[in-house]
């Protein structure tokens, strides 16, 4: 039987023509042939020119997720090739003790995320078509890792994100295979963490900031450090292990604070690092009023916007915390600040920081600009894969 095909409207498909990964419902003229949601389908331009193939889902506004620029079947050989490419890339670019092994569209395995925490894998499946292959992909990963003397003792699924509902799928979480202790110890940048793969945020730990956390270490020796939105204490602990004299981590989640304190004890840093459960938006103005000052201030907030419609509110939020954060930095001290929303693009984020500096009457000297760690590769022309923007500035008084 001939494979069904999506035919694009004339003038549409600009994103995938430049290397992107998604075709939206409003870009499609028609579908020729029969299909079931989740099937592999050919993609053709309006004039019949072949553009590759992808997984179709009529429930989703992202109607087709591309898997190849060629006519292709998703068979065992294809999946093994993709998985091997993903693992070989990680071995070449990052410390694989804890890393993202598969990053969805950026690894041409759309909607699938696999994180490795020591000897445990965590799977997040967010697209219907790839969901049916997740068990095979995990098996292939385990085989590849075993060849490198890495033996996986357990796999946990965290497909509990709301986005699955938009794909016509149920949210789910649980063990894929035998049960195991879901508190997993990892080591990153010489810092030890207990990762809760069952109940932690996303897959349990934010691996994308790995080398950004390392980058702040060189500014923290003998410093007083304020780490806002600390989550489980990762930036705070990197500051402390680098020799900071005092570190204060703040987060609005008591569960996160409890985990951060546990991580501080795990590293023998409980005397130099303290954590408290507070709303950063309330705390920063209060500290300013009290005249508090720090050598280093770190701002690692959650995404303030997950849609284009709320960008204006997000800009206000980023401007506010950066203005307040700058005012708390001692003259010639350092500010580390980031955004993890792909809707807040690099240009807009930079403009917002500039507005905050003007409002705070501070001058900024950019030390460096960074993005997500290489195990979260940025696929050019796929905007969603480029989401993390991270700056380090020296903050100077206007003179």
Image (cartoon, rainbow, N blue to C red):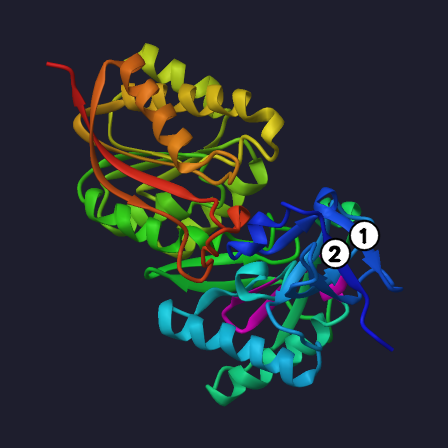
> Tag 2's secondary structure?
strand
**Label 2, on which residue?**
7
- Seen at 74% across and 56% down, the residue is 7
- Give the quarter of the image for residue 224: top left
Q: 30 and 325: which one is in front?
A: 30
> Tag 1's secondary structure?
strand
Residue 25 at x, y percent in the picture: 74, 45
Q: 57 and 171: which one is in front?
A: 57
Which stretch did the figure color magenta?
Answer: 113-131
Picture quarter with the C terminus: top left
Report the Cα–Cα distance between label 1 and label 2. Answer: 5 Å
**Label 1, on which residue?**
30
- Label placed on residue 213: none
- Seen at 58% across and 59% down, the residue is 105
> Are the residues flagged by discs 1 and 2 in contact, CB closer than 8 Å?
yes
> Is residue 129 on the magenta stretch?
yes
Residue 95 at x, y percent in the picture: 38, 68
Against 322, is 290 above or below?
above
In the displayed image of the protein, which residue is found farthest to the front?
Answer: 47
- Confirm whether residue 173 shows in the render: no
Q: Crowdedness of circle 1 by 10 Å Cα count: few (<14), some, many (20+)?
A: few
Whichever of callouts 1 and 2 sits on the residue coming sooner in the sequence is 2
- Give the quarter of the image for residue 368: top left
In the displayed image of the protein, which residue is found farthest to the left?
Answer: 399
Picture quarter with the N terminus: bottom right
Residue 362 at x, y percent in the picture: 22, 19
Against 125, is 59 above or below?
above
Q: 259 and 375: which one is in front?
A: 375
- Confirm whether residue 145 shows in the render: yes
Count of numbered tags: 2
């Amino acid at each position: 039987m001939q494979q069904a095909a999506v035919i694009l409207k004339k003038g549409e498909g600009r994103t995938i023509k430049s290397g992107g990964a998604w075709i939206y419902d409003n870009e499609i003229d028609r579908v020729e042939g029969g299909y079931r949601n989740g099937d592999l389908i050919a993609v053709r331009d309006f004039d019949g020119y072949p553009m590759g193939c992808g997984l179709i889902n009529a429930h989703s506004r992202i109607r087709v997720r591309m898997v190849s620029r060629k006519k292709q079947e998703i068979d065992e050989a294809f999946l093994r090739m993709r998985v091997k490419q993903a693992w070989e890339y990680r071995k070449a670019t990052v410390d694989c003790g804890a890393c993202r092994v598969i990053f969805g569209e950026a690894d041409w395995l759309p909607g699938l995320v696999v994180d490795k925490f020591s000897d445990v894998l965590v799977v997040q499946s967010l697209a219907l078509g790839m969901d049916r292959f997740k068990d095979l992909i995990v098996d292939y990963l385990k085989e590849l890792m075993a060849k490198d003397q890495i033996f996986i003792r357990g796999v946990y699924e965290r497909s509990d994100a709301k986005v699955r509902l938009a794909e016509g799928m149920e949210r789910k979480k649980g063990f894929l295979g035998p049960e195991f202790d879901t508190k997993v110890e990892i080591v990153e940048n010489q810092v030890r963490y207990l990762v809760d793969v069952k109940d932690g945020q996303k897959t349990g730990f934010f691996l994308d900031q790995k080398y950004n956390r390392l980058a702040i270490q060189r500014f923290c020796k003998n410093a007083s450090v304020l780490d806002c939105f600390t989550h489980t204490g990762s930036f705070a602990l990197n500051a402390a292990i680098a020799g900071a004299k005092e570190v204060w981590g703040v987060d609005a989640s008591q569960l996160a604070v409890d985990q951060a304190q546990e991580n501080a004890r795990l590293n023998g840093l409980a005397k130099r690092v303290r954590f408290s459960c507070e709303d950063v938006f309330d705390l920063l103005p209060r500290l300013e009023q009290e005249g508090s000052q720090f050598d280093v201030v770190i701002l690692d907030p959650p995404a303030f916007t997950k849609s284009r419609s709320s960008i204006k509110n997000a800009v206000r939020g980023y401007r506010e915390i950066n203005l307040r954060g700058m005012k708390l930095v001692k003259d010639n001290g350092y500010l580390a600040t980031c955004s993890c929303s792909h809707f807040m693009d690099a240009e807009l984020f930079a403009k917002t920081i500039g507005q905050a500096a003007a409002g705070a009457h501070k001058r900024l000297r950019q030390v460096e600009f960074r993005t997500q760690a290489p195990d979260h590769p940025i696929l050019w022309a796929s905007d969603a894969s480029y989401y993390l923007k991270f700056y380090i500035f020296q903050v100077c008084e206007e003179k």
